[in-house]
Amino acid sequence: MHEALQLTGELKGLRDPLVIAAFWGWSDGSGSAMSTSRYIRNEWHGTEVATVDPDRFYDLTVARPRVRLRNGERLVRWPGTRFHIATPTGSSRDVVLIAGREPALAWKDYAALVADFMQAVGSKHFISLGSRPAMVPHTRPAPVLLGDADAYFEDLIGRPSEASQYQGPTGIQTVLMVHLNSLGFSTGRLTALVPGYINTGPNPRAIISLVQHLDRALGAHTSIEPLLGEVASFDAQTSTALGQVADPDALREQIREMEETYDASQPDGNYSEPAAPAAELPTSDEILEGVESFLRQQRDDTDETPGA
C-alpha cells in the first residue's frame, strides 16, 4: 500500500467494485461533478475508508485548511482526497468514491497512489466525473458525454465514446487515466455539459444527469427528489438574473436558439454539441457579471465545496 495513503476503514469483501472519481478544479469548473459525488455518497450510505496525506500533495498556502467549532472544540479540516465505499440501492456491485481537490504537487506519485488503492480493493475499472461549459441551455436536462473510454465503459454506459483531440495543459483526471491505462486498468470519463453563460457553481440538472447515467450503468435506483427542488430554485434565480443583464432580449434569443438545437438532437438519445455560431452568445464581462453576481448572492458556498 502506498505510504501516503492513510487507511481509516476496511477494504475487503467488495463485489466487483467500480471506482468513481471527481476532482474539484480543472475538470470540474462548475463543481457539479464534486456535488454529484457528494450526493451519491450520501444516498448510497458511503463509509470513509482512506484519505491522503495533505502535506504530500497540496500547497497549504493555496488550499488552506479550515477550522471549525464542534461542541466548543476547534477542529481542523484538511484539504485533500477522501475514499468512500458505498453500495448503490438495487446494484449487484459496490463502488469506491474518490473525491477531493485536484492535487497541487507530486502528480506522478498521486497517480501511483490511486493505482495502488485500486489494486488493494480489487478494482479494474475507473471512471471520472467532470463538467465543462458548452452551448447548451439551462432550461433542458444537462447532456452527458462519454469520453476516452474503452469498450467496457461503452457497454456499461450504453453509448459510444468520443476520443478527445485536445492538446495542451491538462488536469489530474487525464493524468490518472493515462497512468491507469498503462497499467491495464479500464478507464473512461463522464462529462456533464453546463451552460457557458452561467458559471456560478454546481448545476442541479448536471448532477441529475450524472446520477441517472451512473444508475443505468450500475443497475441502481437512486432518488433524485431532493435535487428537483434545487432545479426549481436554480431556474427561478437564473430567470431573475437574466433580466438584469445589459441586453436580456438578445441573451434570451440566443437561449431559444440553443433550446431548438438541443431539442433537435435528442431523438436518438445522444447529444451532439453544436459549434459556436458566428454571432456567439454575449460573452462580455458585463453580461456574465450580471448573471454570476446575482447567483453568487443567492447560493451559499459551503465549506465542503473544494473538498471531499
Image (spheres, grey):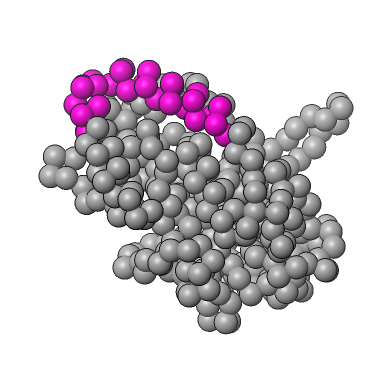
- Front in this rendered view, residue 133 or 77: 133
Highlighted range, magenta: 227-254
Residue visible at 49% across and 25% down in the picture = 232
> Relative to 241, is 1 above or below?
below
> Relative to 40, is 228 above or below?
above
Residue visible at 65% across and 65% down in the picture = 18
> Relative to 42, is 290 above or below?
above
Furthest residue toward front = 267
* Total numbered labels placed on residues in the image: 0
- Front in this rendered view, residue 51 or 274: 274
- Front in this rendered view, residue 145 or 134: 145
Judge from the rendering whether residue 190 lies leftward or rightward of residue 224; answer left or right.
Answer: left
**Is residue 296 visible from the viewing direction of this image?**
no
Judge from the rendering whether residue 297 lies leftward or rightward of residue 258; answer left or right.
Answer: right
Residue visible at 33% across and 49% down in the picture = 266
Furthest residue toward left = 278
Residue visible at 70% across and 54% down in the picture = 90
Residue 227 position, x and y percent, is 57, 34
